[in-house]
Amino acid sequence: MRTGRGILSVAAGLLLVALASVGYILPPAFDPPPLKADVALQSLPPQPPAELRPVARVSDFREEEISVRAEGQTLHGTVRFPVKPGRYPAMVFVSGSGNGSRTEFTPQAEFLSRSGVVTLAFDKRTVGYNFRDRDFSLLADDALRMVEYLRTRSDVDPVRVGVWGVSEGGWVVPIAAAKSASVGFVVLVSSPNVSPLRQVAWALNEQLLRLRAPVGVRDLLTRAMGAVGFDFLRYDAQPALDRIEQPVLAFYGTTDPSIPFVESTDALLRGMKAAGNDRYTIRFMAEGDHAMRVRGGDFTAGYLDTLANWILGLPATARPAAHVAGATPVQRFQAADVPAAPWYAGGTMLGLTICLAAVGYVAGPVAAMVVRLRGRHHIPELNAGLWPPIRRRLAKMVWTGLGLLLSVVAFIMLLVLFSINQAGAWPAVLAGWLVVRVLAVLMLIQEVTAVAAVVSGLREGMRPSRWQHVAIAGVLGGTGLLLVAAAYYGLFSFPW
């Protein structure tokens, strides 16, 4: 059963080269080019002092819980309103992705309510919104129902009811504004304005650069993204932007790792031009992150005051002295689309590959156990001597294959955990990537040596039983499928 180490090394090397070539040759490729920013965004004027003027406290505020019937469910929200009698401007908060709890807007809502703005924050719907299916138009209808509720209140000026949206809400709010003239103004915070897939791909690339992760990590994740077939990921935001006629205030943070803020601004400017709308204000906030906070702490300087002054000053503040102002943004790379994966690499085929490998891995140990339980008196004497070393190799391959699958999942979870707080994360990212690559290469070597052991055993006269055939075919076949999948996702590519 001995095969020369030199022959095995050459065979493993040739297979490694072949698998590495698969990662290079097969589409889709993702390599976003550097961004050539608009000259107008390379040096911005400072914000006008009037926008940053501290906002006077008008009144204490009260809270009121409300329920509004929407499509498929009842939405619950909290209205905060000044105690002092009057008719005030009002605003609806629209959340970003996720569960969208109204509590995330409490600090902003309380500040605005003390300043003389009625606010409404509501919990995002759970019917018709999940990880796979997201209807931005349906979410826009929810926001419009809240707008109509506010317009019925005696303490609200019905012509000054606006909608505020952050992140994913930046795809929702423009739809609401384009649908209804009841929306009096629009506030966009960290609004992507490109397709969700482009936004996620840009964020992934940017965060991996900040983590100093190897380029292979990006290739693994972007190819996995290309296999995802969620329709909402390719939503085109531009048509809704092109139809906004209301005053618009947009905020972007210069340290935001989640959206391509320069290209998002370009898209918004195109929309304003298409709509013939010159009532827009775009402000870049120094050190601001995705939530307009500084490293997840306090709000960036000037954000709350600018927001309140703009709303309270409408309609005069709708036409600012400088449409775009604030800290100068720097976006290194373009937001490139992730090409859709070919049919043989789509989510269905990947799931089928993993399932088949799992079946092979289960069938292999079960068959090997059956062989052992039947006892040596049922096994030909020659097989009894040649089979145990092969069985041990197959068992090791099963554990390595399972270890690779688990390590890839754990590595992706690690990247998610480090996507926000990236301080000191790069050693862990490098270590995790090293573990994944080492397990992939180890699995390749085990496949080559196991095939060699089986071939040698057959040459020496071993006659595998039916159950031994099942064990050999199941483990070698399952590992072969995983090797091809690993090759497609770049686990054998160089540089690493």
Image: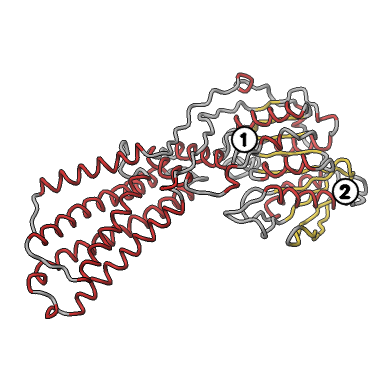
Q: Quadrant of residue 267?
A: top right
Apparent side of residue 376 relative to residue 469 in the rendered image (left or right): left
Q: Nearer the viewer, residue 419 or 390?
A: 390
The residue at 57%/45% (across/down) is 233
Q: Name the residue rendered at 25%, 40% in the picture.
A: 17
The circle on residue 253 is: 1
Q: Nearer the viewer, mark 2 or mark 1?
A: 2
Q: Residue furthest top?
A: 39
Mark 2 and mark 1: span between their CA atoms? 31 Å
Query: Which residue is at a point 58% across and 54% down the rendered structure image?
Result: 131
Q: Secondary structure at mark 1?
A: strand
Residue 317, given in percent of the width and then of the height, sits at 81, 30
Look at label 1 and name its amino acid.
Gly
How many other residues sit within 10 Å of disc 1, few (<14), some (14-19) or many (≥20)?
Answer: many
Which label was assigned to residue 151?
2
The kind of residue tagged 2 is Arg
Left or right: 332 in relation to 2:
right
Up-down relation of residue 250 to residue 126 (above or below): above
Camera-nearest residue between 161 and 30: 30
- Residue 421 % position (x, y): 50, 45
Give the x, y percent position of residue 243: 75, 34
Q: Nearer the viewer, residue 48 or 6?
A: 6
For the C terminus, give its image quadrant: top left
Q: Of marks 2 and 1, which one's residue comes earlier in the chain?
A: 2
Q: Is residue 462 visible?
A: yes
- What percent of the width, then of the height, locates residue 471? 24, 66
